[in-house]
Structures are given as C-alpha cells and as structure tokens.
Image (cartoon, rainbow, N blue to C red):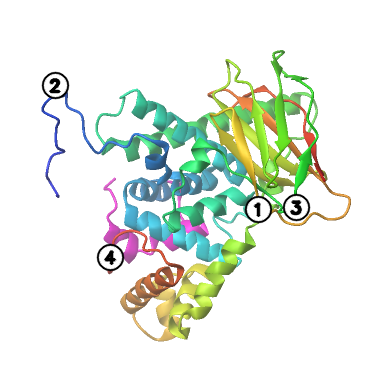
Amino acid sequence: MKDLTCQDVHDQDLIVCYLTGEMSEPEAERLEKHFIGCVSCAAELERGAELRLAHGSRLFGLKKLSGLSMMDNLWTLAAAAAAVAALAVGIASLSAEARRVSTPDAVRASAGSPFSFDARGLSGGEILVSWSRIDDAAIYRIEVIRSDGEPVLTSETTNTRVEIKAGALPPLPAGVSLLIRVRALNALGQSVAEPAFQRLVAE
Amino acid sequence: MEGRPPERNPDAGVDEPSSLPSSEADLEQFRVRLTLFAARRTRNWADAEDITQETLRRGLEALRSNRLRDVGALPAFLFATAVHVCQQRDRSAGRANRALRRLGAAAEDVAEDSLTTLITEERLSRIREGLEQLDRDDREVLTLTYGSGLRAEDIARRLATTAGNVRVRRHRALKRLNDLLGVTPGPNREP
C-alpha cells in the first residue's frame, strides 16, 4: 500500500478520523507510519488530541485518561519543553503540604530476592525515594495511589532514585491517604520484585 | 539541506551519521505519538504508557549499541518496536485471562476501570482559555472538528461553505491557538 503524504492526511481529514476511532485497523496503521516520521502531522495529531479532551470528547472511544502523565507529556511536547526528565529521573508531584513518609523495612520481593525502597521527606516538601539495584530489573516503576485504590501517579526510571517534588496533587478527601511503592520490572515488563505499598503520612 | 548526505568525520574511519539521536531527550519527541498509538491498540492508557516506555528504552538501547546507523531508520524502528511490544502484551494478557478462566475467575476488564482516574484539569483549562481567546469563527471550526469529530465536508455543509475553505480555516485557527499558547509545533504548512 502506498505511503501517505501530508496532503493525503489533510485532504481526507485523517487526523480527526483517527482520533475519533472511525478508521479501520489497516488505515490507522498506515497513518501511524506517517505520524512517526512527520513532525508536522504528529504535532497536529497531538494538539487535536488535546482539543478533543478539552471538549470532553473521547479519544478512540476511550472514556478517560488513566493518569496524569499522558497529559503532562502532551503538554510538555507541545510546549517544546525539555522532557528528558520523564525518562531520566521519573516525575511525580505531591501536594505543597510537607509530607513525611513512613520509612519501610526491607520487604521480600515476590521472586524471592530481597528488595527494599526507602522514602524520605525533605525540608522543602519533596520526597526522595531510593532503592538498590537488582540484577533482573531493566526498569523501576514508582506508583503512588490513594488509599481507596485510585491510581494517582506512575513513573518509570532506570535510575535507583527519584525525587518527588512538592507540587500540585489534587486534594485528598477526608480519611484518604497516599501510598507509594517501587516495583522492579524486567525487559518484558514483568514484575521481578514487588514490595507492598507504604503509606505517606502528612506531617 | 535536502538531499545532502550527512557530513562525515574524516578522521573517524567509519561512516557515522553526525545527526543520529543519542540521548533520552532525542527520543522524547516520539513519546506522545507512541503513547497514542499504543492507547488505540490496547484501549488502556496505563498499558499505553508502559508500552511507550518500553519502546523508548529499546530505542535508546539500539542507539547506544550502534544498531541504528542511519538516523532515518529511527522512526520506523520505533514504530515496529511499539507494534511488537503491543503484540507481546496481547499475548501475555491472553495467557493471564486463560489462567484466570481455568481458576474459575472472571478476567477483569481493566481497560475501562483504568480509565476512570484523573485528567489534569490544569492542562485542559489552558487549552479552553486559549479557545476562549480565539474569535468566534476560529473557535467554531475547532470545536466542530475536534469536539464534535466532524470532517471538513460535514462542517462545510453546516457552514454553507466548501470543504477546502474549512480546511484552510482550521489550519489557521490551529496556528492562532498555538500562538496564544506560545508554541509553534512543526513547520507552518498551509493545506
């Protein structure tokens, strides 16, 4: 099948059709091949996705975004900001109020190898999370959830520490707190060490 | 620049494209579109973000190990990798569901559940503020296009104009919105 050109994308309104999910799988894949190598059309795709969400419309028929990072990334790219932090450091933010983290004891990983993480509150309200590297892990996933099970933030890094900056977390309802954990994943994305969540306690 | 071969380092002794991306920052430009691709396939934003991260990780690994010697091959490599990672996920999910069924448990439809969390209202409100600052015609064409998901032909019928005119208006409205938001994504291409 012939590769698409920017003119095809425009003349056939392919971006709108793609975002609304009104496109066959072969057509969508053909368009994605174009997007991956075309800065101009990719930028329009990303702005179109933002505009659909801003209008309360679904992307691909999906109900909502699953978390913050997607919109963070959309915005980051659109603003041409340096986005390296997402990969190199891992990003997350916590409410401006200073939080203290209950320092967990070493926990035993599901795969049998000991794996522990440590989370410490800093003076500026930031939280420093660190852990030791383990052999099978290709990446580490930091997860913050609410105590009622609602996911809040997820970030991944190949490093062994992240700093969670004091920032804007949505206010928590009464009786709800935040929990954090670090999971170690192998190259296939499978969990090789999965400690329990630890509670973040507001000072 | 078009058609001009990459400059070579005469002392290097090997062909080494000077513009080959070599860092996380270079790969980051692909993050959003990869996430969109993966979300469309998996129907799940959380999985999409995981797939994107894995794709970028493999891309970085390929760059660092010099497996990609031509900068032009990077987009195709990332696209093929993303598709491959999606397929791996599909197979894993299939195995997990079959295992659950063998145990008599219903496979949980995480796709819908995981889509009920937060949208960054701050981001969306900035876009909405930008829309509010546009004139009525610009706002109308963007709302009909992206909010209602209408194609240019449908909008043209509503506005009693031509599809070509709608496309030009849409392009200009997007540009004005980008200007208001302080960004200029990509080359300025008039349809």
Q: Nearer the viewer, residue B145 or A198?
A: A198
Which label is found at residue B55? none
Q: Are marks 3 and 4 on the same chain?
A: no
Could you tell me which residue is drawn at 50 percent across and 42 percent down?
A85
- Which residues are the magenta region? A1-25
Find the distance from the CA under tag 4 to the CA under tag 1.
Answer: 38 Å
Quickly name the residue at label 1: A167
Looking at the rendered structure, the kind of residue marked 1 is Gly
Q: Chain of mark 4?
A: B
Q: Are marks 4 and 1 on the same chain?
A: no
Quickly name the residue at label 2: B13
Which x, y percent locates residue B9? 14, 30
Decide: is B127 above or below B166.
Answer: above
In front: label 2 or label 3:
3
Could you tell me which residue is drawn at 79 percent across and 23 percent down?
A105
Q: Chain of mark 2?
A: B
Quickly name the residue at label 3: A97
Could you tell me which residue is drawn at 50 percent across and 36 percent down?
A88
Q: Nearer the viewer, residue A152 or B98?
A: A152
Contact between marks 3 and 1 (CB within 8 A): the answer is no
Residue B97 found in image quarter = top right
Q: Nearer the viewer, residue B126 or B84?
A: B126
Quickly name the residue at label 4: B189
Contact between marks 2 and 3 (CB within 8 A): the answer is no
Q: Give the mark nearest the N terminus, 2 or 4.
A: 2
Looking at the rendered structure, the kind of residue marked 3 is Glu
The reply, left or right, for residue A192 in relation to residue B172 is right
